[in-house]
Structure formats: C-alpha cells, structure tokens
Image (cartoon, rainbow, N blue to C red):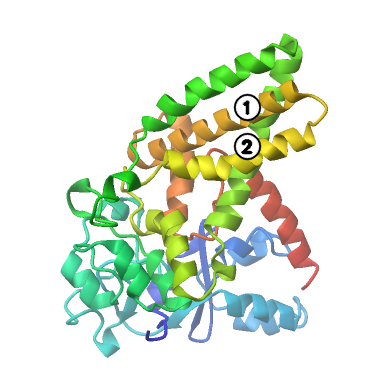
Amino acid sequence: MPPRTLPTFTRADVEAHNSKGSCYVTIDDKVYDVTDFVQDHPGGPELILDYAGKDVKEILQDPTSHPHSEAAYEVLDESLVGYVVGEKTTTTNGSASSAVDGGGDDGSQKSSEWVHPRTGMSREEDLSKETDFTTDYKTHKFLDLSRPLFPQIWNGGFSKEFYLDQVHRPRHYKGGQSAPLFGNFLEPLSKTPWWVVPTIWVPCVAYGTYMASEGLGAVELTAYWALGFFLWSLIEYLMHRFLFHLDEWLPDNRVGITAHFLLHGIHHYLPMDKYRLVMPPTLFVVLAAPFWKLAHAVFFYNWYAATSVYCGGIFGYICYDLTHYFLHHQNLPLWYKQLKKYHLQHHFLDYELGFGVTSRFWDTHIRHRAGTRRQNQL
C-alpha cells in the first residue's frame, strides 16, 4: 500500500484552529495539532492558546521566555498533521490536499472549507452524508461498499498504517441501510437492533438482583449493586480505550486487522449504521463471562454480594449501549447534547480522545494524570 500522505493547509485554515477545542500551531511550513496537549502544557493552557493558529518558532527559541527541551519538540513531532502551502482542495470523505498538485480525483472538488486531516470530516453532520461508493473506492483503494466487507478486509493485504488511516475516515451507506458484511447466511447475525439489548438483558439483571436479595439486606444489596454500576463506568472506559482502540499494539497482519475491524473498526468506518452500533448478544456473552468469574473471585466471601455487583455492572452496560445508540441517532434533551457532541467528536475529529461514552469522568481524570507525567518529561 502507498504510504500515507500528509495533507496541506493554507494559512487561513491554520488560523481558524484557534480555540481550546481545536488548536493548531506551525513551525515554518509544518502544521501541528496540539489540541490534546493544551490542558497538559506545563506553563498552563493560556500560553498555548495565545499562539493558537500562529507560528511558534520564535517563542520556542526565546531563551528569556522558556527554552524548550528536546522532549518538547518530540511531542510536536508526534502531532504533525500536514504542511502550509497555497489553496486547498478536498477529496470525497478523504484528506485535504494542495491545489498545486491537482487535489482530488480530477482537481475539480475545490473547497475553502476546513477538513480534518485524520478523518476527512468538517462537522458532525458530515457523518450522515452518503458516500459515493465508486468515487470513494477509486480515491482511497480501501473497501468497496457495494460488496461484502469481510472478504475485502481478509484478502486486502492492507498494512496496519494504511488500514488505521482508512478505517477512521467515516463513511455513510446509502439510504441509512447497513453495508453488506458477509453477504451470506451470516449477515443477519451481524446486525442488532437497539431494543434487543434491554429486551434480553433487563430480565436477566432483574432475576440476578432478586437472587442476590435472598442473601442480602436492602442496604447491602443497594450498596453492592451501586458499586457494580460505578465500576462499569471504568470498565467501559478501559475496554473502549485499550481493547476496542488497541491501535498502537495491533498486529500488522490480516488476522489482527480483521479482528479489529469486526470488533470496533466497522463502527468507526460506518458510525451511523444503526444495526451495528450496539453489541450483539453473542459477543456480549463472550466478553461478560470473565467478569462473572472475576466478581466471584473478588467477593469470594459472599456469593450474593458478588452477584449484586455483577448485576449492577450489567445494568451499567445496558445504559452504555442505549446511550451509545441515542447519541448517534436521537435528539436529546439539552443537558445531554454536550455528551452527544463529545462522543461524535470522537468519530469526526479525533478517535484517540473521548473514550467515555456515558460519562467524561474517566477521560478527565486519567488524562489529567497522564498529562502530569508528560509534563515531568519536559
């Protein structure tokens, strides 16, 4: 596969990224996305935001202000997203490129609108724009949405770098339908309507809670159940960040790439597919079974306590899957809209941020601790 080409930007494009939510800086002609480092900056976020959208070469070299270490430049190197040139063009659901070298397929898709270099998106609404199958395949040489996806992933011979770049550039299947995954009798097993989750698992949680109540008082039952519900929020964060997004550690072979695609990659590739958004019951059983053993190993002294904790955790999962579906497909109350925006930014802005779905709690606290460690390196 050809190596990934970094996009190009005009000065006006860079200057538009001048906020805490999207912060770019330049050094000469190199463009850096330092959004996720704003809050972690040792001198405070204000020092970066003062130079948001601007060139920072002089301030970085100013000995009276703050001489930066080599580690600081390494952080910047990891944030390189493109280069400053002349006018910009965009490709369908793809990266930005320079008008100097012709831009998209035929150089005709010119636009002054900013396009995120990693996702090919400009805004939340872009997630629902139908993808032109023919143009997308011709442009990116990745997957043809008109044909079953599984054999294409398995036989595609994609490198990990190319696959991760492409699978995190969202597409949208025509008519709001589901793209073919297997194209055979397995196809129905890959689709799960949202209502299946509460229909199957709420009765199980109710029965398990009833069983736990046989050996616990009301206060104990509530306390253990609430503990399980709280622990789920951490499990949700850890699984999303370190299992579903194990991108850095993903084996560079077709087994690893195919497993990643089936587990979570297909959701980032087609984030508005309403039938592949909640977890299929069979997959949930596989993932949930070890936690039953873990709960009873930790609370070995009381079977009823372990069962109560587990039921609270499963109810947390139900809330997670329903919340995930509604964030993508429902109009939410005002107090929920910020959470919707937060999650959809994970899809159309930066898939390496925003791992919490039902809450930002662990994102905020774990990123803060990671940022503190990062500061100590500078």
The image quadrant that residue 165 belongs to is: bottom left
165 relative position to 226: left or right = left
Task: Give the side of residue 292 with respect to residue 215, left or right.
Answer: left
- Which badge, 1 or 2, comes first in the chain's sequence? 2
What residue is shown with label 2? Answer: 232
Mark 1 neighbour class, 10 Å CA radius: few under 14, some 14 to 19, many 20 or more: many
Q: Is residue 51 visible?
A: no
Dot 1 falls on a residue whose secondary structure is helix
When the figure is inspected, residue 324 is found, relative to residue 65, above or below; the finding is: above
Q: Secondary structure at mark 2?
A: helix
Image quadrant for the N terminus?
bottom left
Residue toward you, 210 or 223: 210
Residue 32: percent from left, percent from top: 53, 75
In the image, residue 165 above or below residue 200: below
Residue beneath the point at 66% across and 81% down? 73
Q: Which mark is residue 312?
A: 1
Q: Extreme front residue here? A: 185
Q: Are marks 1 and 2 in contact (CB under 8 Å)?
A: yes
Type of amino acid at the residue the image marks with label 1 = Gly
Percent across and percent down for residue 297 are: 76, 37
Q: How far apart are the alpha carbons under marks 1 and 2?
A: 8 Å
